[in-house]
Image (cartoon, rainbow, N blue to C red):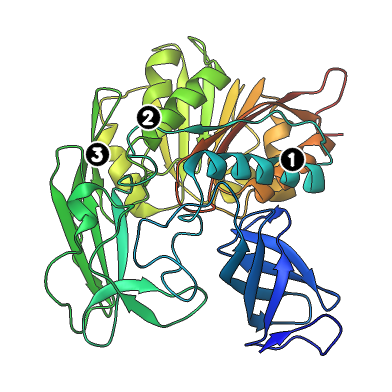
Amino acid sequence: MTIKAGEAPLAVGDVLEVVIGQIAHGGHFIAHAQGRTIFVRHAITGESARIKITEVRSKMVRADAIEILVKSPDRVVAPCQFAGPGACGGCDFQHIAISRQRSLKQQVVQDAFRRHAHLDEVGVVVESVPGDQSGLSWRTRVRWSVDSSGHLGFHRFRSSEILAVNTCLIATQGQGGVPEGTYPGVLEVRSAQGSDGEIVISAATSGSTNSRRVNHEVLGRNWNIDIESFWQGHVGAAEALVRAVLDLGNPQPGETWWDLYSGVGLFSAYLSPVVGPTGLVVAVEGSARSIRDARRNLQHDHHVKLVESDVARWLAKSTDHGLVSGVVLDPPRTGVGPVIARQIAAQEPRVVVYVACDPVALARDVEIFSTFGYRLDKITGFDAFPMTHHVEVVATLVPIPGRDQIS
């Protein structure tokens, strides 16, 4: 039964008619009813919709749009049969035209900086990343969940229930068909497709993994990476981000750069030939697996120094790091926070290039850096996760003229 305004407090299962407002971070759109703010999935700003409440908390109400009464001109038929209310939780935006998806992500980034960095005019554009097919067939690495029957699938949104699937349209063509067979007793299956077209599959059981390696090519350079190591999922993201880091950071011969949270050494590998034999790149990474991959792939890059360490611990351990011209940051989704920001600012680099997968964490860190004498300079976004709400952002921070960087 549809609930009318003012009738009763909201409860799970209630159905309401609402007008959909602006987008919110996380793939939701805002609606209001019964004096509550409701975060709605599967809708678009400006639509009128019938929504079903899926979760009620003291500070948050969630809902799915189950019927669209007035459609947005940007609404399209979701290409995947497993997308939609109550189904696969992976793709938030399959019902939205790809150009509108990018404008919505741009709005999310701008709103994050307005709310968390107190910057009203952030001129960011979310660019497409070469390699996908209108937002599909881009994901080279997939983590498949396994249900009790051994069938592969994905979790329903905010649920432990696994939806068995027979295809994934955002996976690269070779993985669109789910890996064959069933996997009884397996906790998780990972599949990856390399630049050479080979598909590698790794199955994890309790306490063990069947680790495999994948070949990738980026800007003419070959990479051999453990399937368990982090690698950009979009087929074109690694190249796009490397180009952005080099363009925005503008490294010069003879400079020293830090590559913090360096992973398998992606950015270090391309900074190295630019700074040259008189320069140095220090790559710091806490994952032993990623450092092993970096040693394997950067063994001939003699002016890259690989450091296996937690970044905060490494920064705090020594005060004699030497003159640093530039820093690349590619931190976890949570960002870096004030301790690391202060330690970086204390070295007075001429530029910090920040690669972020969460615009809110980035905006918070930009605000933190501003207290240590650094301001946002340039920013660009990449649609490295089409059909989802996720967006990759690369920003540069530079010293504020006349400010002491650690005041």
Vertical side of 211 occupied by 249: above or below: above
Task: Please name the amino acid that badge 1 sits on.
Answer: Arg
Q: Which is nearer the N-term, disc 2 or disc 3? A: 2
Residue 351: give x, y in percent of width and height.
65, 23
Q: Considering depth in this image, is 224 or 197 the residue closer to the camera?
A: 197
Q: Residue furthest front?
A: 70
According to the image, label 1 marks what residue?
Answer: 342
How much space separates mark 2 and mark 3, taking CA atoms? 20 Å
Vertical side of 223 occupied by 183: above or below: below
Task: Please name the amino acid that badge 3 sits on.
Answer: Arg
Q: Considering depth in this image, is 191 or 334 the residue closer to the camera?
A: 191
* Left or right of residue 142: residue 155: right
Q: Residue at x 17, y 60 (%)?
A: 201
Task: Please name the amino acid that badge 2 sits on.
Answer: Glu
Residue 231 seen in this snapshot: yes
How much space separates mark 1 and mark 3, taking CA atoms? 32 Å
According to the image, label 3 marks what residue?
Answer: 296
Q: Quadrant of residue 105?
A: top right
Q: Which is nearer the N-term, disc 2 or disc 1? A: 2
Q: In the rendered structure, find residue 239 and report the number of the disc placed on it.
A: 2
Q: Which is nearer the N-term, disc 1 or disc 3? A: 3
Quadrant location of the C terminus? top right
Contact check, label 1 and label 3, Cβ < 8 Å = no
Tag 2 secondary structure: helix
* Left or right of residue 356: residue 152: left
How much space separates mark 2 and mark 1, taking CA atoms? 30 Å
Eye-nearest disc, 2 or 1: 2
Q: Residue at x 88, y 18 (%)?
A: 402
* Left or right of residue 64: residue 137: left
* Left or right of residue 150: residue 114: right
Residue 297: give x, y in percent of width and height.
26, 35
Q: Considering depth in this image, is 74 or 292 the residue closer to the camera?
A: 74
